């Protein structure tokens, strides 16, 4: 019998399937649809009460995708991409969540999704080649598990002394209340100035009586230039979707930019040529700014030149020189996740918005009535933690996964995540990670990256079925090689030069290893090559 929210639980007996997928975000939904179409019995386990993953949880004011709508969508069904109408250049969270729900309805996905179910343990049993997943609502068993758990799905809420005695409400951007929050008439404190805060701050400021932003590290941001989507533009995309989607896959970040990527070194451009090019991209808006020259992510001098351009913009935009100085970053640009904004720096010109620099004097504690820094209390009625996530590994490690012979994933990843292709882990047979560490994932437009992984996993499961192979797992040497390869590629870039969540540097005690792999097209080629070469580097048994 089917339970109200999908998968049957057989009155306390384990729910047994070919494949259990953890997570019903864009990865889990497509994985379910794809495998179902190939004749597999699939169940999806999801802790939320609805689909959408990131877009289910991140409902903070101003939450919006930084990838343009026409590109941040599934490509697997040409009918779907033709029928869905986007309304803005970059979609806001409510619209993306509506799209996710539309997909769930269109392909009748919910009947195989067990909502409001949290995985608490995942164990491999060699005796019957099965995974057993313990959840807070019963046990699931399957030959294969697919971790479609997202890269930014475990909130990071740093501990501040006294927070439990704070008299007002506190919120984390990644766990925003579904009923929304009304800040009108309130004094609000926002802690953090990453991508989420940069989107939220202007919107919260427009609503509240007083806003105090606690900034530990200033961030570079470039205008998104969001606007209603032009009907002719949308029609043009739809008429050319196949060619455009194919072109996206040839790009480093799996998305095409409004202006062609510059290939020359920034440091060799004349002052006039450089200024003109950067200004044009500043006006066009979006990630094309960060791709104005070929070596922005590779060469410190070129990077410094682009950083200086943004510093100049901050000085122009922000009226108060002291606030402008505090907002001005001095580290490598685009080394942390590049930010796009709508009036972020401008917001600090508003009389009711103030910036508190906590870089040298950290937040001391939260008092019942506010945030205390350097002995001074900043009174606030509500606190927003825009403090990010335990990225890429946090959710996987919290699931208590054990592989062959009881080996714990937490131990295997003690010195940083180890995967082969970001898809499999040695000693954890038949477990796949969608956009796992060691794959391009967060450095790309996530949906094409997800589709590439889901297609690869689906092909692999079909091949195993055809060959009668019961298990697949990476050879230790292949995994070791891949870890070295990811590090070597990252070391060619400027990414390792700052304290980003890509490196795990935002979580106290987390091992610092660069987790995603820069460069989507070569990665896709390697995955194809591995599969075609009899799953080179994997053991099939
Ligand atoms: P981020 O980018 O990790 O930003 C978190 C922010 O919170 C960042 O400014 C941090 O400062 C700040 N932070 C974290 N801990 C503290 C403490 N203890 N005190 C003060 N400030 C703190 O998370 P986002 O949610 O903005 O973005 C995550 C991704 O979601 C984003 O890249 C998109 O892909 C979507 P720090 O820089 O560490 O000094």
Image (cartoon, rainbow, N blue to C red):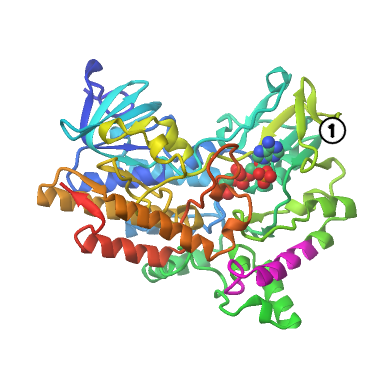
Q: Quadrant of residue 207?
A: top right
Range of the magenta residues? 292-313
Q: Quadrant of residue 40?
A: top left
Visible residue check, residue 83: no
Q: Residue 163 placed where, x, y %?
A: 70, 23
Q: Is residue 501 left or right of residue 395?
A: right
Q: Is residue 186 left or right of residue 406?
A: right
Residue 200 vs residue 376, the one in the foreground: 376
Q: Is residue 23 left or right of residue 152?
A: left
Q: Residue 499 placed where, x, y %?
A: 63, 49
The total of numbered circles placed on residues is 1
Q: Quadrant of the N terminus?
A: top left
Q: Residue 323 placed where, x, y %?
A: 85, 50
Visible residue check, residue 162: yes
Q: Residue at x 44, y 46 (%)?
A: 99
Q: Is residue 300 magenta?
A: yes
Residue 130 vs residue 426, the one in the foreground: 426
What residue does disc 1 label? Answer: 374
């Amino acid at each position: 019998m089917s339970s109200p929210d999908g998968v049957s639980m057989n009155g306390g007996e384990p729910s047994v399937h070919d494949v259990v997928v953890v997570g019903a975000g864009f990865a889990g939904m497509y994985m379910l649809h794809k495998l179902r179409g190939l004749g597999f019995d699939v169940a999806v386990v999801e802790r939320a009460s609805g689909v959408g993953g990131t877009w289910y949880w991140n409902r903070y004011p101003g939450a919006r995708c930084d990838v343009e709508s026409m590109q941040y969508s599934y490509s697997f069904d040409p009918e779907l991409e033709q029928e869905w109408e986007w309304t803005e250049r970059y979609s806001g969270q409510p619209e993306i969540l509506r799209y996710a729900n539309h997909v769930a309805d269109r392909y009748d996905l919910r009947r195989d999704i067990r909502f409001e179910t949290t995985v608490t343990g995942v164990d491999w049993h060699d005796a019957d080649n099965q995974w057993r997943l313990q959840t807070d609502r019963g046990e699931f068993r399957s030959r294969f598990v697919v971790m479609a758990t997202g890269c930014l799905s475990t909130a990071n809420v740093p501990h501040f002394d006294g927070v439990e005695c704070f008299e007002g409400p506190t919120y984390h951007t990644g766990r925003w209340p579904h009923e929304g929050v009304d800040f009108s008439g309130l004094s609000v404190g926002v802690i953090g100035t990453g991508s989420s805060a940069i989107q939220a701050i202007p919107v919260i400021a427009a609503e509240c009586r007083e806003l105090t932003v606690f900034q530990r590290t200033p961030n570079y941001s470039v205008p998104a230039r969001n606007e209603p989507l032009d009907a002719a533009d949308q029609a043009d995309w739809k008429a050319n979707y196949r060619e455009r989607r194919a072109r996206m896959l040839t790009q480093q970040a799996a998305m095409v930019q409004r202006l062609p990527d510059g290939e020359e070194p920034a440091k060799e451009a004349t002052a006039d040529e450089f200024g003109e090019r950067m200004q044009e991209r500043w006006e066009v808006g979006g990630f094309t700014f960060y791709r104005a020259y070929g070596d922005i992510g590779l060469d410190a001098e070129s990077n410094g030149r682009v950083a200086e351009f943004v510093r100049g913009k901050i000085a122009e935009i922000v009226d108060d020189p002291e606030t402008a100085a505090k907002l001005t970053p001095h580290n490598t640009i685009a080394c942390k996740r590049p930010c796009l904004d709508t009036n972020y720096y401008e917001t600090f010109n508003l009389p009711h918005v103030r910036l508190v620099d906590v870089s040298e004097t950290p937040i001391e504690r939260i008092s019942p009535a506010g945030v205390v820094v350097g002995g001074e209390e900043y009174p606030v009625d509500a606190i927003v933690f825009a403090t990010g996530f335990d990225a890429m590994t946090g959710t996987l490690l919290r699931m208590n996964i054990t592989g062959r012979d009881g080996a714990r994933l937490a131990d295997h990843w003690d010195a940083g995540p180890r995967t082969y292709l970001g898809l499999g882990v040695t000693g954890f047979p038949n477990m796949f990670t969608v956009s796992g560490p060691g794959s391009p994932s967060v450095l790309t437009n996530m949906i094409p990256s997800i589709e590439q992984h889901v297609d690869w996993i689906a092909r692999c499961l079909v091949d195993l079925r055809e060959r009668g192979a019961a298990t697949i797992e990476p050879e230790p040497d292949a995994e070791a090689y891949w870890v070295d390869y990811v590090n070597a590629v990252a070391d060619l870039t400027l990414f390792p030069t700052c304290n980003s969540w890509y490196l795990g540097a935002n979580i106290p005690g987390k091992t610092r290893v660069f987790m995603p792999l820069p460069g989507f097209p070569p990665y896709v080629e390697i995955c194809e090559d591995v599969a075609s070469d009899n799953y080179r580097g994997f053991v099939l048994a």
